[in-house]
Image: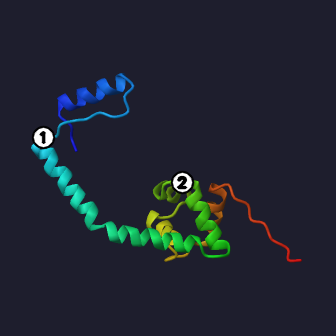
Amino acid sequence: MDLTPEQQEQVTQARAAGQKRVTLSLTPRQKAQWQTVMEQELAGKEENLAHLQKIKAAAEQPGFFGDLRRAIALSRRPVHELALEIGVDWRLLSDFRSGDAELPAAALDRLIETLGLRLVQEIPR
């Protein structure tokens, strides 16, 4: 949402004063924009929650891929950034996180390296 010059000045003054919050009065147009965005967000809420549950369930799977999905989550790196760094489309990495896709071996190697992981073999006793 675009701020009016007066609102921008309020934000600038608040930052200069070291304030972390500022209260702005919205114009009728800004209120309408905010309402539209909130309605869109709420409309997709259930779908977003279901997707997050799917990502969580995939990360809880035992074995290598579950471990790798947990490492992605623990890295707290944005999917877009991580995908760009390992050279895959962000949607593919997102689908991998939720268990809906597999990554090519070369991408897995780059992902492991990017996350600073090492593969070790556990020797059974």
Name the colour scheme.
rainbow
The quadrant holding residue 14 is: top left
* Crowd band around label 1 with a 10 angstrom C-alpha radius: few (<14), some (14–19), many (20+): few
Residue 65: x and y, percent?
62, 72
* Crowd band around label 2 with a 10 angstrom C-alpha radius: few (<14), some (14–19), many (20+): few
Residue 75 appears in the figure: yes
Looking at the image, which residue is at 55% across and 75% down? 102
- Foreground disc of the pair 1, 2: 1
**Do the numbered discs 1 and 2 sit on residues whose CB atoms are within 8 Å?**
no
Looking at the image, which residue is at 66% across and 57% down? 113
61 relative position to 25: left or right: right
Q: Quadrant of the N terminus?
A: top left
Residue 107 appears in the figure: no
Q: Check disc 2 and report the residue beneath it.
A: 76
Q: Quadrant of the C terminus?
A: bottom right
Which of these two is toward me, 81 or 2?
2
Does residue 108 sit above or below 29 in this rendering?
below
Residue 99: x and y, percent?
52, 75
47 relative position to 64: left or right: left
Does residue 66 sit above or below 21 in this rendering?
below
Looking at the image, which residue is at 22% across and 35% down? 24
Label 2 residue SS: loop
Which of these two is toward me, 78 or 16?
16
Does residue 50 sit above or below 31 in this rendering?
below
Identified by mark 1, the residue type is Thr
Looking at the image, which residue is at 62% across and 61% down? 71
Residue occupying the far left of the picture: 28
Does residue 104 sit above or below 16 in this rendering?
below
Q: Check disc 1 and report the residue beneath it.
A: 27
Identified by mark 2, the residue type is Arg
Residue 29: x and y, percent?
11, 46
